Image: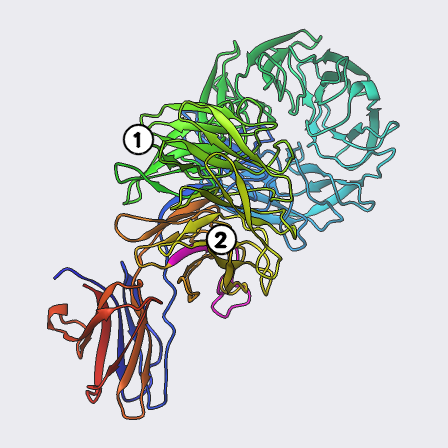
Amino acid sequence: MPEAVQFGARVASGKLPMKLNVRNCYGVAWVGLVVSSVLFGFRAPALQPETLFNFQVGLGTVMGSLVQGPDGNFYGTTTEGGPFRSGTVFRVTPAGALTTLVSDQANPAAGLIVGNDGLLYGMTAAGGAGGFGTVFKLTTSGVLTNFAVFTGVNARSPLSGLVLAGDGNFYGASQGGGANGFGAVFRVTPGGIVTSLVSLNGTSLGGFAVAGLTLGPEGNLYGITSFGGTESRGTIFKMTPGGALTTLHSFQAAEGSGRQARLTLGPDQNLYGTSQDGGSSNLGTIFKITTNGMYTTLVSFNGANGAVPFAELSRGADGRLYGTTQQGGSANVGTVFKVTTNGALTTLVSFTSAANGMPQAGLLLASDGNFYGCSAGAVFKLTPAGALTTLASLYPLSGSVPQGGLIIGPDGNFYGTTRLGGANDAGTIFRLSPDGSLTSLFSFNTTNGLAPQAGLALGKGGNFYGTTVLGGANGSGTVFRFSTNGTLARLASFGGTNGANPQCQLVMDPNGNFYGTAPEAGSNFAGTVFRVTTNGALTTLVSFNLANGASPQDDGLALGKDGNLYGTTADGGTNGFGTVFRMTPGGALTSLFSFNSANGSAPQGGLVQGQDGNFYGGASFGGTANQGTIFKLTTNGALTTLFNFHLADGQEPASRLIQANDGALYGTTLFGGPTNGLPASPSEGTVFRITTNGAFTSLVSFQGTNGSNPLASLVMGNDGNLYGTTSRGGPGGGGTIFRIVLTPHLTAIARLPNGNFALTGTGPSGSPFRLWASVDPSRPISSWTLLTTGAFAAAGTFSYTDASAAIPARFYRVSTP
């Protein structure tokens, strides 16, 4: 008996139940409910999205050198990134297996050290009782213990890691805190006692110590400040373990400034460091300073040999010093070098791509004699001779932050894009099977595009077409063609009079040409409408001029049944709150409507033409609560506001509506949603249904764990269910792909004065349903009593009066045949 049983409810006379029980299983739900003689109803629970895939957020930028643990693996930190965007502690094996150990600490400082007990020690820049940071220890398996807390006076927000001194205590420096607010140098005992040794003063003692300390040959500690000194460019200082501080050097203009790179003890017992600026080309230096303060510039970077060294140097087994630059080299994305103590520099590696180059971390000389380091997007191994091997990617290769909608391909799978992630952290194209199996098909590389923010469009030849917001020849976005065999062709680049930064899904006309919008640039700097052929010939059809609109965004154009194209602009028009326009395929534009805030403002999501010939869309702001509206518009420009959002039912609709098989419209809001009566409960976007006459139902409320901030339109799958993406949230923090099973359900049961029961429910508009009753819910559906059959009304509702309610107790359920 083919059917989908969707919702059941038990009613009985007698005592009230202790609780309301709900169980969902692919749309099957049971609700236990007792109805007294008083008129009583209940609100059906919101639908729950079924998460098909969780995208991960990248680990973030590694700022400190790796450290080798007692187990032979390498450990490091990132200040930002991870699912909470608050940084991570990670482990990578010599073979390249990368594991995130901690992702819920507040901004770990750069770098870890190994204590005398074999544990890993580090700090955070935030967290703790006052939010000023903590000191933690960590096992190699990831068990973390915070054992000291900064107060804001003894230290505040350290950015670099600790150093272990010969007395068994840890020492560090912070950019904030101290008695003067210019930073502090402090000691932490293994038992967690923090002692402020020096309060920096921003002048003679320096200030804002962003670099860590270095243990000198005689047991003193050496450090760098980024402010203060004779030129206010920072200082180099020496401090005894007891806290007696001596300023050794004040940076001069030609030498650059003190920054984040700590000093390194060289083989000659002198100290060596780097500066990000200064030198003959003002691109950074390598310098030497003796323990009594004699300062010498050894190398001036000039671009060809590197530029802007962020990180500390590492002492090699051959007596040379090894390091990295973030810029310069053959591709201007950084280098790895070695340098002698007298300043003879050899470039070992010139990175070739921004993703695998631009390192801000130094090198670690490991026990196997090789160096290990981190670039912007990878962990790598380097032999002393300069042979470089990539071990692991720091970017989520499956992609991250999907902001475009899905599209069903000819093979029945879903295809989409992510704005970030992939091999180059420039975005991806992926395929998703209906069961949730995701395959990353392509990684953008900036040249062919960067940051695709819209869904794909299917062309006549079975290829997909799309846009990127950035990248391309001018850095202002592209149009591309993608074939399912993994080949991508850049068809056009934006920048200048043809527009910039397209965020739209393209729409195809009967001839196979594609149309879209660019929200920036154009001849009037207000955005454009363009046409592009499948071989890449791009024509600018309209340059907006504020009077006829400005900033067409997100979901682009809709092809009307009359052959014209319809769209919205987020700005401009008569009142400056955005417009709806009609354009012929040749580019003749007619402004149909100008918003006035009361009926909406900033319509960003485009339009959809309903079965009735009218267009439907959303305005992100405006309306009675200034939180957005849903509107209907005739082809001659008569607009009707169907719904005003009020936070609890959603806020800021920013994507195109779709009309489903039931005739209702479905959409998303970027923020808002019901909080189930809990003021602190997050409301991070919704999915809703609205009929063409304005009957509104909130279907899904996102709370972060199940995704948040859906920025894209939905798609109706071949199975009749809704599929969509959230741009953030989920366990990995990088967004989700979800499915919503559209299930008819009972919405209220009320006892009438004559003892009968009035039942009401909702479901897909016009779809048939059956209403069943039974005294035993465990019986198969074939043995239930069929009370009635019918079809949901145009508003997606039904009602029925059960005149057989003299039965002491019975269960109801509604199904779709």
* On screen, residue 13 above or below 45: below
Instruction: Out of 380 and 734, give the one closest to the viewer.
Output: 734
- Give the numbered dot on residue 768: none
Q: What residue span does the magenta drawing correspond to?
A: 665-681
Mark 2: few, some, or many residues within 10 Å (few <14, many ≥20)? few
Q: Is residue 400 magenta?
A: no
* On screen, residue 289 above or below 671: above
Q: Which residue is mark 1?
A: 462
Q: Residue at x 40, y 26 (%)?
A: 534
* On screen, residue 173 above or below 39: above
Asked where in the image residue 251 lies, by quadrant, the reply is top right
Q: Is residue 608 left or right of residue 103?
A: left
Image color mode: rainbow
Would residue 394 be visible to someone looking at this image?
A: no
Q: Position of residue 572 (x, y in %)?
A: 63, 46
Quarter placement of the N terminus: bottom left
